[in-house]
Each structure stands twice: as structure tokens, then as C-alpha cells.
Amino acid sequence: MMDFRFKSPLKAVLMRRLAFEAFVAGRRFDFAEIWSEHLPAARHELGLPPHEYSESAMTALLSGLLKRPVQLRQHGDGVRPVDAWAGQWRLHRVPPHDEVRRLSLNPAVRKEMFGSAGHRRWTMVFRDTALPKLTVITGPLDSVKKACDGLCGVYVMRRARLYIGHSTNLGARFLSHLSAGEPQWTVAVAPASSDDKVDDDVLRVAETLLTSLWGEVALLANAKSPSNIPRSEHLQQGVLLAKAAAAAVHWLKRHDADLGLPALEIPFIHWRVPGWPACYLEPQETPIVRDHGEWPKSGWDLIFASGDEEEDDPDLPDAYEWGIDLTGLAHRGIIDEAEHQAASAAGREAVEALPEEARSYERYRAGCAACARVLGPKWKMRKEDAGEEDDWDLS
């Protein structure tokens, strides 16, 4: 069975967009369109700035999707995702990340109310008339449980990873979470209107889409892959609720300090790209769309002539990104200042000793090796929070 999860958020978003174009919009596309439209749009979704990929970098990225494992296949004169993507309705309907962040920038928020037991509560209206008005509650889990008694909705909870759930009675649902202890934070989101009870199938769709959305960029405790396609009315209502709920969490994350809340830290996927994940939380400009004619060669000849070379893959680490990991160890208190300086000096010396023609990944590997010699087992701890192996094949 195909695993639709990726270590690279960029590849996850790109493949999801291509699957929508192929199996929902019913469009055909080729490498030129992927390069000129869909890849810039995927970067924009994640908050990454426009980037001019070289021919070899594009070759490496696309050959990865064609070979490790196969995600794309030839389709006439163009290309399309493999058939396993056709039934993934949960991925076809994921709200785009940039739309969610845009909605979170300026919602109308009613003056907060302080709960008697420490929870905080807001009413949110987003500047999209299709989205529901929301009641948003956060605080200590026991207090949130009491405030949510009888409410139906969805929730996001942070322990080591994100846990996303739903219930027609959130208060009763939170009772089962109390035995695991206090999470780092909990956000409950419920439609503010009390006129109609939200159908459980709508809540299930919203939970599924939130899981798919956050699963592209963060570490999850409960990734789900439901196979049953929901009824159209449940699907549409669930999409709108998921989009509004995700925007509410973004708004709280952006303003947690101003609101006097504990930091809503999100366990983002460890991804060696400059600016990540800070760029994901910031608004950005309109993406650059290139002329299709700029794709330099016949796509299939270029891809399959490339073999398995990955040296210019845009997901590979930069020459000095070992320094980012080193700084992270220092910030977490795993190494002291003397160890930080010693490892940094050893890394720089190792990188600068390489010949000028050495590639970025070779410099990165030399820096990592030098840090490992100085720090020993502590160097391996740089990946523990991300829960990933120490590699750079992020396909």
C-alpha cells in the first residue's frame, strides 16, 4: 500500500496539488507546467520565497517523484500521479495552506471571556462569507473539558506530536485524554451557532482534512487514511469547518504572546530549507508564475538520463546547514558554549579544507562528521525532536 506521507513538505504539497489537477479538475499537464506553475504555487503555500531552480535541480526533484518510490507516471505527452492518488479524497480536498494563513491574518474576534477555571474563549468570524462563525476555547485541559461540555466540534492537542480529533460532545471526549496527563496546549473549535447540531459525518470530514493539512508540515500522533468517500453535503461542510478551524489555530499561534497564552509551539517537520518553519507562519507575496516555454528539454529524456543523481536536489541540505543543527543543540541546552564553539570551529575547518569544486552536500557531510567527532553521541540528539533518521533523502 502506498504511503502518502513525505519527509519533505514541498513534495507533499506539490503531489497533492498535482493529484487535484489530475483527478478532480480532470486536467492534463506536463513538466513545463509543473515547473512554471505548480512548483512555485507549492512553495507559496508553504511561505517559501520564489526560487529559480536550475535544470539539474529540477531533474533531481522530478526524478525522485518518478523513481523513489514512483509517484508520477507518463500519461500521453505529459505526466500524472499514479492511480493510487485517484481515491485519496482527503488529499484532493485539503484547504491550501496559504489560504488558511490569509484567513488567520484579520478575523473579527469578539472580546475574549475568561473562564472561571482558567480557560479562554473567543468568538471568531473570518472574512470569507462561506466559513462558519466559530467558538474557540483554549486553556488547561480540565478547564477546556468543562467549557466544552455539550459542544460539538474539532480540536487540536499538542503533546510530543499533534493530536487531532472531533466529537459531538467535546467535553465527554476530553475526559478520555485526561488520563494521559496535561498536554502542552489544547484548542477546541466549535460552530458558534446553536440552531443546528452539526452532523458527526461533517465533523469526521473536518478532522480528516485537518489531519491531512497538518500532516504535510508537522508531526502527527494520529494520521488517518479513511477510504469511504463522504456524501457531497458532508464533504463541503467539512471542508469549510476544517479551513476555519485551521485558521483559528493559526491566529492563536500568531498572537499567543499578546494574549498572554502559553506558547503554542507546533512540532514542525524537520526540513533543512533556509527560513523553515518561520516562513510558514508569515504572510507572503503573490507567487511568480513562469512561461511554460522555459522548461529546457524534453522532460522524459532529461529525467531518465539523470540516473539516480541527487546532488542538486533542492531538498538537499546547504553546505553550512550543519551549523543550524549545532545552534539548535545549544539552544536546547544539550551542549554548552565551549562545546558549541569547538564543534563550530571543527566544522568550518573541515568544510574549508575541501576542494573548491566540492558540492554542497559534500561540504554539509564534512561539517556533520567534524561535529560528530567533537560532540560524540550528543550530535545524534539534534534529530530526536523531529523523530527522523539522519539523512537528507527527503523524497
Image: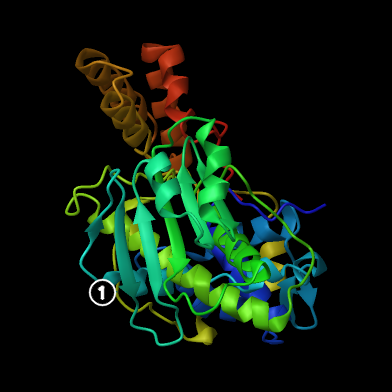
Q: Is residue 307 above or below residue 35?
A: above
Please tell me whether mark 1 sits on a helix, a strand or a loop.
Answer: loop
On the question of residue 271 being in view, the answer is no
Q: Tell whether 263 sits left or right of 354.
A: left
Q: Give me the residue at 46% from left, 32% from top.
A: 385
Q: Which residue is mark 1?
A: 106
The answer to whether residue 113 is left or right of residue 307 is: left
Residue 147, image x, y percentages: 40, 53
Examine the image and state in which quarter residue 77 appears.
bottom right
Residue 319 seen in the figure: yes
What colour scheme does the image use? rainbow
**Can you say whether 13 is above or below 265 in the image?**
below
Residue at 32 percent of width and 31 percent of height? 328
272 up-or-down from 31: above or below = above
Name the image quarter holding residue 363: top left
Q: Residue at x 49, y 46 (%)?
A: 316
Q: How many marks?
A: 1
